[in-house]
Structure formats: C-alpha cells, structure tokens
Amino acid sequence: MLKQLSWLIPLLEVVELSYILPVSKPSEGASGFTGIWRSFKPVIDVGKCRKCLLCWLYCPEAAIKRVGDDHMSIEIDYRYCKGCGICANECPFKAIIMVKEG
C-alpha cells in the first residue's frame, strides 16, 4: 500500500502542504446541508492516523478539514460529508472506518 504513495514523497519535499488547497469548498445546498442523508459516516482512529492527508486530498466534498497549529491533524465536517467512503478507501493506514449512521 505504501508503495502506491511513492509518487507523493518527491512532491512533499518540494511543496509545503500548507500551500495545497482543495479545489472546492463545501457550501450549503438548496436543500440545506448535504450530509443529512448519508447511510454511513467515516470515523477516524487517531491512534492509527499518520497525518499523510490523503483523505483530505481525495475527499470530493472537501468535508475533511485540516486543523491544529501545524494543520496536519484532520476533522470531518459531518454537515457536508456524504458518506461516500473514498477517505476510508484511500487511507493507507486504515485509520478511517465507515460506521452505519444512526
């Protein structure tokens, strides 16, 4: 799994992650917040998270936010998370699991 990340290592040496911004930002849709209809939600195991930020990079809804003084910790904005599971699928450390909502 880590071999798949080999392309990312040279990039991280050249580009500081604080300058990489998501392409889109979540916003309230015509029907309100978009996360209210999901069936599964991602839950982060902070003990397994290695702060690689791939979940943040791949989230199609930009519902994963970088937080903390170093901007290397993440949190999920469940108001916009649609529960697609891409973050859990892309996490090489299996630090994100999808849990049935409710």
Image (tube, helix red, strand yellow):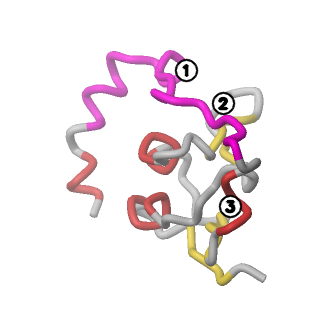
Q: Nearer the viewer, residue 23 or 30?
A: 30
Q: In this view, does 79 lie to the left or right of 54?
A: right
Q: Quadrant of residue 45?
A: bottom right
Q: Is residue 92 left or right of residue 24?
A: left
Q: Give the range drawn in magenta.
A: 8-30
Q: If you read the primary sequence from the N terminus, does the residue marked by circle 2 or circle 3 appear first?
A: 3
Which residue sits at x=54%, y=52%? 50
Vertical side of 85 occupied by 12: above or below? above
Q: Look at label 2 and name its amino acid.
A: His
Q: Name the residue under label 3.
A: 46
Q: Name the residue under label 1.
A: 18
Rounded to the nearest angstrom, the CA distance separating label 3 from label 1 is: 20 Å
User: Callout 2: 10 Å neighbours few (<14), some, many (20+)?
Assistant: few
In the rendered image, residue 2, in percent from the top left (x then y), is placed at 29, 57
Question: Is residue 25 magenta-colored?
Answer: yes
Q: Name the residue under label 2.
A: 71
